[in-house]
Image: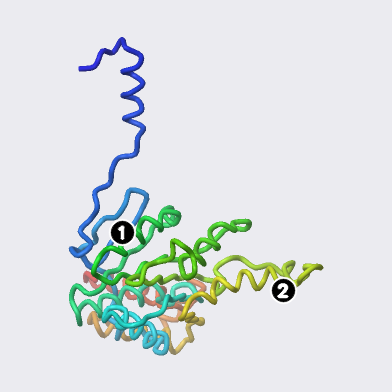
Amino acid sequence: MSDQGDPLARIAEALERLAPRTVPSPDWHAAPAYVWDQQGARLVAQIKAPPLDLLHGIDEQKARVVSNVARLAAGFAAHDMLLWGSRGMGKSALLRASVATAQAASPGTVALVQVAPEALSGLAPLFAALGAVDRRFLVFLDDLGFEDGDSAGPRALRSWLEGGVEARPGNVRLAVTSNRRAIVPRHLSEQDDPINPRDAVDDRLALADRFGLSIGFPNCTQDDYLAIVSGYCAAHGLEWDQGEALEWSKRRGQRSGRVAWQFVTELAGRAGKHL
């Protein structure tokens, strides 16, 4: 036991308590998915995602994402991906489902690594760790956005995508979802720059241009919304009414895959079923 009367001993103990704990390196071959946060990486035992055939209304987007993830899993040339557009249209679900499908076809070849929002600045050590592993990884940044005035974040992301000394390694690809194609906010005032009116706009769009695949997800049509509801209900043995489904979307103020799933959850709850 240390001498509590010794000020140097007390200072040493205080510094020990303040020092960040050492995070053990995970087994990067042990799990289908991981979460990277400020504490390091933790294993995820199972990727939860709907079957690909239940993702309706996004057939073209689905084909491109599934193909790209399959190429990554096979070790072929693959793109970084930006999935942008309407809320609730299955961007993140499609990414998870695509990785799960690739894993089922070729077990152990690829893993999903989701980065927590607060851990964005810690991507460099993550890339360093993944680059030393004989496996492919899709690093996933969900619902990414930058605040007004944040220039460091977009610049770092551009550097990670290509050209920087801390760019992602060859066995890693980035997948980003965002409500905006440009990821960063844009304002009409950018068009009025008296010195060089396009510079500010072009600098922001340059971030989106770094992605080999930039895939838009438009608003859900009524037919697509009803097809999504129908597919989910058929898969789970639920009866449903078209008028009620449309009324549900009106009350939510939106038609989307997410709203469709919420309606199906309501139906399942009424029927005493577990999804």
Residue at image point 63% right, 56% down: 149
Q: Is residue 266 visible?
A: no
Give the residue type at disc 2: Arg
Say which quadrant the C terminus sits in: bottom left
**In the rendered image, which quarter contains the N terminus?**
top left
User: What residue type is disc 1 on?
Assistant: Ala
Q: Residue at x 41, y 54 (%)?
A: 122
Q: Callout 1: helix, strand or loop?
A: helix
Across and down, in percent, residue 229 comes to 35, 82
Q: Residue furthest right?
A: 194
Residue 259 relative to residue 76: left or right: right
**Residue in the picture at 46% in, 75% down:** 82
> In this picture, is 90 found above or below 166?
below
190 relative to 82 in the view: left or right: right
Label annotation for residue 241: none
For disc 1, the marked residue is: 129
Label 2's element?
Answer: loop
Image marks 2 and 1: residues in contact by CB distance under 8 Å? no
Across and down, in percent, residue 205 comes to: 60, 73
Q: Quadrant of residue 271?
A: bottom left
Residue 29 lies in quadrant: bottom left
Q: Is residue 63 above or below residue 26?
A: below
Q: CA distance from mark 2 to mark 1?
A: 39 Å
Q: Is residue 275 above or below residue 220?
A: above
Residue 23 rendering spot, x and y as whole percentages: 27, 46
Residue sitting nearer the eye, 194 or 245: 194
Q: Residue furthest front?
A: 165
Q: Who's the residue at 51% across and 74% down the image?
A: 210
Residue holding disc 2: 198
**Which quarter of the figure has residue 188?**
bottom right
